[in-house]
Amino acid sequence: MSAVVPGLPLVLDLDGRDVLVVGGGPVAAAKARQLLAVGARVTMVAPHFDEASHFDVASDLAGLPGQAVHAAGRPTARATLNGLPRLVITATDDEDVTAAVAADAAAARVFHNAADRPEHCSATLMALHRRGDVTVAVSTGGRSPAAAGWLRDRLAATIDAGAERAVRVAAVARDRIRAAGRSSEGLAWRNLLDEAAGLDGGRVAEADDAAADLADRFVRRALSGDAHSSPGGAHGSPDGDRAGRVQLVGAGPGDPGLLTVAAVAALRWADVVVHDALVGDGVLALIPKGTELIDVGKRPGRPVPQEAIGALLVLLARNGRRVVRLKGGDPYVFGRGGEEALALAAAGVAYDVVPGVSAALAAPALAGVPVTQRGLAAAVTVITGHRALSQPPVDWEAAARLGGTLVVLMGVAERAAIAAALQRGGLHPDTPVAVIERASRADQRVLRTRLRSVGDLLVEAPATLVIGEVAALDLRSAGGASSGASAIEGATTELCAAVG
């Protein structure tokens, strides 16, 4: 089996140049639109133009920058190639016509593309996405146009406003450096691009002003000979003498699919990531190679003082690093992100917060439990079960009288004491409880029981406790939706049998 030669991708300048399109149906019209949009002079040849598919050449192609000429006639003769167009595209179901035009194009040494006929192609059109000066082009060698479009759309989702701004900043800087008669080779372009991409796209005017300032400083340093890449790679901003920045980023409950777009952008921007133990491996796998990783996760037998983490963030930023503090869930929902923000503010270090999906809401949803439900719960209360974080201590007996749904994070070790205190506060022993272990991960497990039996369950951290009538629901599928005593008792019986 011979290796597939994918060819050499090129960008053709077709402005004002002749292109022949053979075919009169909707696919041919789509090709003609693409060509006319880039200024090509298009000649379309077909026995007839397909009115049955609502294709009207004159109206469909009106207003585009190129010029279209339409000719009716069977396009199989070499006369079709008179004038030697720069490109020939065939979009017809007639195999004989496609083969004949391909042969004519080969004889005339003109590149030919046949829609959905890779065996007749000497040129392949790519699936395109354009945003500003950025063009994403994807090819499967003509073997699967649908797959090319699918992959194009996935890649296009990563070309955000920050990426577009970064390209614009680099282009402006390059033009100014070359206009001054200096070479643009060997400069620390990646540092400039990373810094520009990391600007806050939510405040467009401020980000554009900051981008212009970045370009100015980079050009000044380039012209002074001080903007070249160091052999080991440079950290920090393009001007190198400015303090770094910290982003407090929520990593969600574990599944990388639950990261926000802003969180993914922050991981691309960082040159050092300081992460917790609960950050999932799938999330860490998204961090670009070469980015420094520092694990400060608090584990049994290995406590990491919170003050030490704050001091580390300050030190890294003062050394000009772009720092992401990556925390499971949301930084400000029992993630101690507030303490880190205060430490950074006290040290005069600039920081941003990128909210994350908290397990307090994600875990119940992934277990099929709506934390609010008409007729069952009109409120939800999120409480930490971790004694060390309960300052002042949680009044569980008062919490029992709040009504609605209680969601307890970090309450595995104290679950029996929590259940007892809630019952003393008046919560009925038969109140449904759902326990979600390792929410969103491949080994997620959901346990359902009653409040009186929570302490008897074998539960492994990390786990989220959901207490209230909604915990009897399982809305993961229409067939799985259930409520009431029978569902709870059945699940409890099955669980007890499983644990012996």
Image: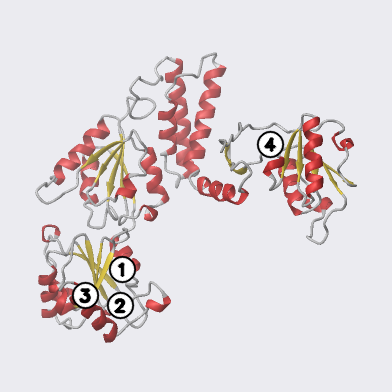
Q: Secondary structure at mark 1?
A: helix
Res. 498 mark: none
Alpha carbon distance from label 1 to label 4: 52 Å
**Which residue has dot 2 on it?**
470
Mark 3 and mark 4 in contact? Answer it, CB < 8 Å.
no
Q: Amino acid at mark 1?
A: Pro
Judge whether 126 appears above or below 220 on screen: below
**Which residue has dot 4 on it?**
123
Alpha carbon distance from label 2 to label 3: 19 Å
Alpha carbon distance from label 1 to label 2: 10 Å
Mark 3 and mark 1 in contact? Answer it, CB < 8 Å.
no
**Which residue has dot 3 on it?**
495
Q: Amino acid at mark 2?
A: Val
**Which residue has dot 1 on it?**
364
Judge whether 41 appears above or below 392 on screen: above
Mark nearer the N terminus (1 vs 4):
4
Residue at the spot x=32%, y=35% of the render?
Answer: 291
> If the image is split into quadrants, where does the C terminus sit?
bottom left
Question: Closest to the observer: 206 or 498?
Answer: 498
Q: Is residue 302 left or right of residue 167?
A: left
Q: Amino acid at mark 4?
A: Ala
Q: Secondary structure at mark 4?
A: loop
Mark nearer the N terminus (2 vs 4):
4
Mark nearer the N terminus (3 vs 1):
1
Mark 1 and mark 2 in contact? Answer it, CB < 8 Å.
yes
Residue at the spot x=30%, y=64% of the render?
Answer: 363
Alpha carbon distance from label 2 to label 4: 59 Å
Mark nearer the N terminus (3 vs 4):
4
